[in-house]
Each structure stands twice: as structure tokens, then as C-alpha cells.
Image (cartoon, grey):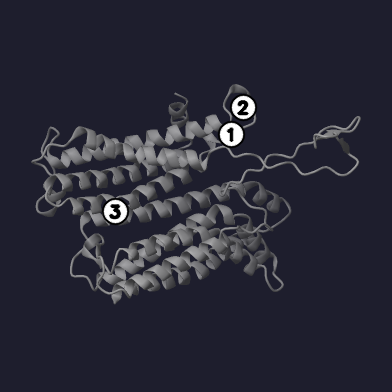
Amino acid sequence: MLALRLIRVAHPAVQLRRLTVVAASAGTGFLLLCSLGHALGHPADPSAALLRLAWCGVPLAATAYLAVAVARSDPGTRPRGGLSALGLGPARMMAVSAATTALSCAFGALLALLLFLSLRGDLPGPPFPLDGAPHAVLAARERLPVPGTLLLLAAVPAAASAAVAAALRPREPKAPPARAAGAGRETAGTGQETPADGAETATAPAVEDDPGRPLPPDRSPTGLPWGIAVLAAGLTVETYAGGTGDGARAVLPGGLSAGSAPVLVGWLLTAVGLALAGPGLTHLCGRLLQAVRPGAVRLLAGRVLMAEAGRIGGPLGVLCAVASAAFAVIALHGRASGRFGPLTALGALLVAGCAVAALVTAAVEARQLRVGTTAALRRLGAPATVLRSAAALRTATLLALFAPLTWAIATLAALPLSR
């Protein structure tokens, strides 16, 4: 009931972000149902049905990623000090966030089921006029298995709510710093320190290791070396797979064919590497802006990028990975004889839309968190043109780094498939 009330009284902007989760879950559920329909219509080819179901894992992961981004930006489910006395601590608010995500995804899955049944003609009224290839994935003459249909539809809310619960789980606070010598005495034989007479025990505030939390400007994200290593491993796997010749072939969406199955593993490693390296690259952009005697605009833009690297760097890396994969597939599409089908276009649009929506959500949340800082700068007499120039400089710097990086990775990813 608390999750339903929070959904009802939320701000319109929050409701809009939740509607994007509903739309993404509806698209993913429809793709899962189409894979079930293809399996029912082609019982003699189980490997093709399994491959289609495996490819649905990409939009499923994108939907879960968007659900996590929306849940982190939801102000109604953030832990507050006053709510802990009412039993609404961090663990309870995490459960509320997971329940809210599950309700949104379940509504999207219901919409997908209604659309799928309407296309098949199982609902009252005339079905949509479809002929040719779309009927091959609907299996209009076959009866849908109820357990399998419910299991596929339940996969979307289950995966999204589990991802939200894992991302927002309460973390153990770090140990408070040691007090100065002489402030207390150590109990003999126990290793515990007791406060001196008249001294109060001071505890440091809990600092959670939240990747969406703004970093101190001087603290660099730790994922850049790991991201570069995983990215290099992915490109190495793709290059090795492209030089193996005619190996085990795997069919890509749209009728494209990869040189071997390790090419798909290389693409996955490349995407994970970019996502891990995104915060570090954003922090590096902030440092470069402040190099060599920066002015007020460069200093302000650089410090903001460094502080928000942990919040917007990850979505930037994910969008870079999606764009590089899209560029590689588009470059290879000219060499392929087939055309992209409607389901392939829907899956690509779903993944790209989730990546863009997650980045926009993180950017809007970062802007809201800078409201106090912006107001303080204006009280100090900072012109509005300085703030706008700093925002434009941040955007241009990120584009100058991530756009060539996306193009280079897309070119390297397409090389194994062009041999």
C-alpha cells in the first residue's frame, strides 16, 4: 500500500520517469512473447527459438538498468532520518523502491500481453491487419501455454526489482576515524578505547559507497583501470575471433552473421569496459579543463565535472557502448543481404532509448542537486552568462572525448566482422 501511495502522490516529473520504465518493460515483454510465438510456430527448430530468447536478454538488461536509474532519482523513496523512528529505515525504503519498480514493470508487461493477444486475434474485435513475416512470430493458430507466458512476463519485473534492490541495498558504514592521542584511554586486554572523563564520544557520519553519490572533487573514481582492462580484453577477443576464419557461427539480429560466437563475448566485454571507465573518463575531463591556468568558467566547469563524475559518468559510458555497437551494426548492414526486421528495430530502439533516458535522468538529478550551489553563486554576484558558459563547456568537453572514443571503438568492433 505504501508503494501505491508513493506512486499516486509523486511529482509529475517522477511519474514521467516511471512511465519510461513502463514503456521499456512493455517493449521487453512484447519481445519475449514474440520469441515464445516463434518457438510455437517452429517446433522443429528449437535452436533458433533459443537464440531469439537469448537476444531478449539485451533489452531485459537495458530495462533493468533504466529501472535502477529511475529508482535512484526518486525523491519519495530516499531514506530520511525522521522516518527511521517510524520503521521506515534504509532497508524498508529499499523494499518500497523495489516494490514500486515491480508494479511499474508489471503494468508494462500487462500492456505487452494485451498488445500481443490483440495482434493474434485472441481478444474481442478485429485484429490488426498483419500479413507475411509478423505472423511467423505470433503463432496465431497455436494455443499459448499459460505457465510459459506468465513466466516470461514475470521475468521483467523480477529482474528490474532485483536490480533495484541490489543497487539500493543498505551498506555498512565505514569505521569512524581514530581520535587523537590523549582523548581517551584503551581498556587493557580488550583493545577498545573508552572516552576520557567529561569527553563525549564523537562518531563520524556514515559514508556509503554509492556510485550515484556525488564524489568529492579531489577523489578520483577507481573504475578507470578496470574499465580499460575489460575494454582491451573485449577488443582482443573480437580481433582473435575475427581471425579464426569459419568457426562456430552465430546469427546476429537482422540477418547479420558474426565470424564466431566469441565476437558476441567481445562486444559484451567492450560494453562493460566502457560502463566501468565512464566515471573515470568524466573525472579526467574535469581535470583537463582546469589545467594550465584556468579562468573562472573553466574552473567552475571542471570542478562540477569532477564532483559529478560518479553520477553521470556511468550512464555516459553505457550510452557510448550502445552508440558504438549501433555504429558497428550500421556499418556492417551495407555488407549484409538481409534487412532489419520490425522486432530487431524494436529491440535496438528499446536499448538506445533506455540508455538515453538513464543519461537524461542522471543529468536532471545532478542539476537538481546543484540548485543550492547555483543559488549561492548568484548571491555572490556570478553572472548568469558564466553559469551558462560553464554548462556549455562541460557538454562540449564530454562530446570532444566520448564522440571520437565511440567512433574508434565502433570501427575496431566492426573489423572482425568485415573480414
Viewer can see residue 86: yes
Residue 37, percent across and down?
17, 45
Frontmost of labels 2 and 3 is 3
Mark positioned earlier in the residue sequence (2 or 1) = 1
- State whether residue 159 is above or below residue 221: above
Q: Which quarter of the figure is the N terminus placed in?
A: top left
- Disc 3 designates what residue? 55
Question: In this view of the protein, which residue sits in the foreground, 415 or 332?
Answer: 415
Whole-number angstrom distance, CA of label 2 to CA of label 1: 8 Å
**Relative to residue 395, is residue 129 drawn left or right?**
left
For disc 1, the neighbor class at 10 Å (few under 14, some 14 to 19, many from 20) is: some
Give the Cα separation between the discs numbered 3 and 1: 37 Å
| Residue that sits furthest to the front in the current view | 189
Please name the amino acid that badge 2 sits on: Ser
- Residue type, label 1: Pro
Q: Quadrant of residue 8?
A: top left
